[in-house]
Amino acid sequence: MLKALWKKLGITGAQPAVDTHPFQWLNALSTQASLEGAIDEAVAQIQENLSGSADLAILFISAAFASEYARILPLLTEKLACKVVIGCGGMSIIGTDATGETQECEGQPALSLTVAHLPDVEVVPFHVTEKDLPDLDSAPDPWIDIFGVTPEAEPNFILLADPFSSSITDLLAGLDFAYPNAAKVGGLTSSGGRTASGLFYYEADQEPTLLRSGTVGVALAGNIQMETVVAQGCRPIGEVYQITQCDRNIITELSVAEGEQLRHGSPLRFLQELIAELDEEDQALAQDSLFIGIAMDAFKQKLIHGDFLIRNLLGVDPRAGAIAVGDRIRAGQRVQFHLRDAETSAEDLSVLLQQFQANDPLEPPFGALMFACLGRGKGLYGEPNFDSTLFSTALPTPNLGGFFCNGEIGPVGDRTFLHGYTSVFGILHPKA
């Protein structure tokens, strides 16, 4: 499927960029079944290639080691001198093996260790709990105090959160308010249950800490910039409609341009008309893979891939013709129905990567992180390593690390959201 897709879209594989900057972003992957063996193997791979200081380490480890989470940071920091370590557990782990190939280790013991040498970059770690969060009506200053970096420093954020105790939606709203121009990526832990959830946090000269709640992360400021690719795995169908009447998350009336006139009607009526026009394959897909996209830029005239925030359709009211959406909406927003399947998901990521290559003006990237939904991977594509291989082929950034999440964090438009069924990539460049 992957090779056929590349041929269809004209992707032949870009050539890796020549490394001309002093940054190092190294990933080591181990699939050993013993914790000591996995840490030893990963650290040995890192030490073999690391020539500078370990300014930041990001650790992802599978739920197979959940009973040993408390031992991980002491073992790691004893063997590798790191200034800052953050990490979390996940049901499936993403890393780069010793041959340079990306691997998505689904449902098996695995440890992915990314270590970065970041000259002229300030690495500011943080652990935030629900009780630390300011009121959403607060000024930006309380939020800035929590994260310890000013908006003027132009930081980038990597966030790893517990799904049960982080109030992640409020946290993202506050971050967007205080740092509107900052890129923010990450994911929710997926260790198979509340008791197995694990967040790892360490600063030099402090005790390494296993946390069971809140959010850990880093702000990266200085000579560094993070670009994002957020692949929501859907393709649009039908027309773009405008919401003319709604109540919280219930859409009660839409309008659509027909020539120079607007036609108004119930969302259910428009949806029934749309489905009747689809071919048999898409009609079948619409039975259980139909979503709605909300345009996030109110002023953009021509909407393209990546302009819509994909949300679930929660239900319909046949009598009123209304539909319920998995997010709060408002009158005036534009929406479009979307479908999702394996081929659509693959094409969505491919198109976004092509757009990124065509539009990115920065220096070549030196590293990347990947946060994928548990609903992707082999279960979606029927073959392993699909998203990570497509990314590494279209944009050959070395040493990709990441994990499969209970929810993925990434921007759409100028706001940051918690997604589902998505693969989010954070792509790191030097500024200069």
Image (cartoon, rainbow, N blue to C red):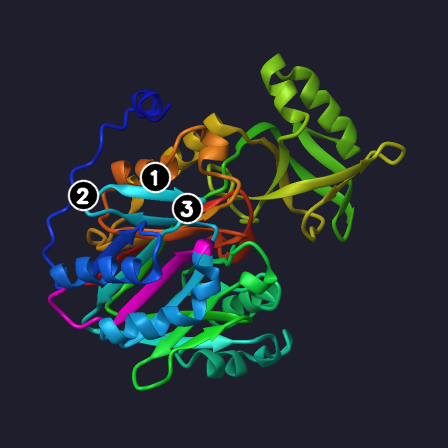
- Outermost residue on the bottom side: it is 205
| Residue drawn where x is 70% and y is 51% of the image | 330
Question: Where is residue 66 drawn, in percent x and y?
Answer: 47, 61
Q: CA distance from mark 1 to mark 3?
A: 29 Å
Q: Say what amino acid the circle numbered 1 marks.
A: Leu
Whether residue 42 is situated above or below residue 80 in the rendered picture: above
Query: Mark 2 packing: few (<14 Cα in 10 Å), some, or many (20+)?
Result: few
Q: Say what amino acid the circle numbered 3 marks.
A: Gln
Closer to the eye: label 1 or 3: 3
Q: CA distance from mark 2 to mark 3?
A: 20 Å
Residue 137, by quadrant, is: bottom right
Q: Say what amino acid the circle numbered 2 marks.
A: Thr
- Inspect this view and state whether residue 154 appears: no
Question: Where is residue 355 drawn, in percent x and y?
Answer: 35, 39
Question: Where is residue 224 drawn, in percent x and y?
Answer: 26, 65
Residues shaded magenta? 50-64
- The image's mark for residue 122 is none
Name the residue that disc number 2 marks. 99
Question: Where is residue 314 drawn, in percent x and y?
Answer: 73, 41
Query: Mark 1 packing: few (<14 Cα in 10 Å), some, or many (20+)?
Result: some
Query: Mark 3 packing: few (<14 Cα in 10 Å), some, or many (20+)?
Result: some
Image quadrant holding the C terminus, namely bottom left
